[in-house]
Amino acid sequence: MRNVNFLERRIGLINSPSPIIRLKNLEKKIGFKGTIWMKNDGVLSSTYGGNKPRKFEFIFKEVIEKKAKVLVTTGGIGTNHGLAVSLFGKEFGLKTILFLYPQPITKYVKRNLVRMVDSGAEIRLTTNPVHAVARAKMLGRKGGHFFIPPGGSSATGNLGFYLAGKELIEQIKRGELPEPSIIFIPVGTGGSLAGLSLGLCESEIKIIGICVVERVVTNWTVLSYEILSLSNLLRKNGIRTNPLKAMMRFSLNHKFIGKGYGHLTNEAVEAVKIMMDEEGIELETTYTGKTLAGLIHFAREKGNGNLLFWNTHNLNEPDIPDLEKKFEDVAEWLGIWTEEL
């Protein structure tokens, strides 16, 4: 029997649907004869926008049901996910412990790290992602603690992007945009793409995931597992899906990662600049800059069609006076390196 209330078992954290914007100036700048649209998840929440609040609506419901007091998660020292957990955790009166590992220092990394410290998160430094995840999982098993997987990518969290796919279909039906031929979305841990692929599996829309981490972490096998896990969760609650069709809906592109996670690329820097100059929208170079670079490259090669850029970057960033000084203080306190790459 279909559990009609299953997808309503969440906490309201977002202002949905996120808006659709046509990027006409970008189209003109790159000489594209089709249309380019943006699904702007950056303004989903005033606490922290981007792709995390969609997942947290379901994850935090589970946190509250289990009466957890401490959230435990992991990421690079500039992790968007870790910052989002810290900020939403603070709103719910929960302590956050972050196991962080090195990544190249950029402006947005500095800003995120300062904000994590300001939010009251307890930071524990590790040497690499494997070590960070192992320690976080171990602590997360302790009574009163709740482990949130990197990126919030779990069957529970990915429900948020399953619904995001349905949300987009409704916006297309209302005439807010034509049905895109291809969606471009960043892929780190892969949960957003997995949920979206399953949510859109009955459409003809293709998805290109621009990978920002190495192939050993992000690959077709990993994404397929996430799709199957989410499909099984939905099926157990009476909601039928077609995971095999969803697996055929997406492809992964590792060509824009550069030297690795968090490392700048010329293409990402150019894409971020174009978006700011032409549309007045701020992106960053780790996720959304590389993804937009992939879209621009595709658009210049193909020349037409209806393309959709899914913005997963928080656009509600507060100004931080004296950012450099605050970062230096935090870096010295934590004992991390401070050179900017």
Image (cartoon, rainbow, N blue to C red):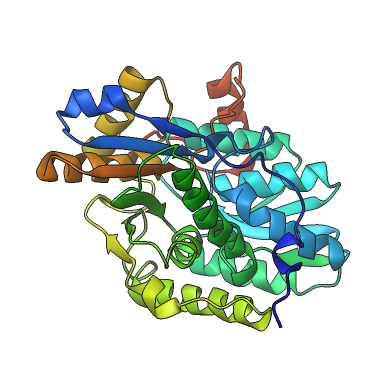
Classify residue 172 as left or right of residue 58: left
Quadrant housing the N terminus? bottom right
291 up-or-down from 338: above or below? below
Residue 98 or residue 286, whichever sits in front = 286
Please tell me which residue lies in front, 299 or 100.
299
Report which quarter residue 322 is drawn in.
top right
**From what the image shows, is residue 164 above or below residue 307?**
below
Query: Left or right of 61: which side holds 114?
Result: left
Q: Quadrant of the C terminus?
A: top left
Residue 265 is situated, as x and y percent measured from the top left of the image, at 26, 40
Residue 271 falls in which quadrant of the image? Answer: top left
Give the answer, above or below, for where 176 lies relative to 141: above
User: Residue 280 in the image: x percent, y percent?
Assistant: 40, 19
Residue 124 x/y as whole percent: 65, 54
Let me know if residue 98 appears in the view.
no
The answer to whether residue 1 shows anywhere in this view is yes
Q: Farthest residue in the front direction? A: 174
Which residue is at 27% across, 43% downward? 306
Q: Residue at x 26, y 58 (%)?
A: 254
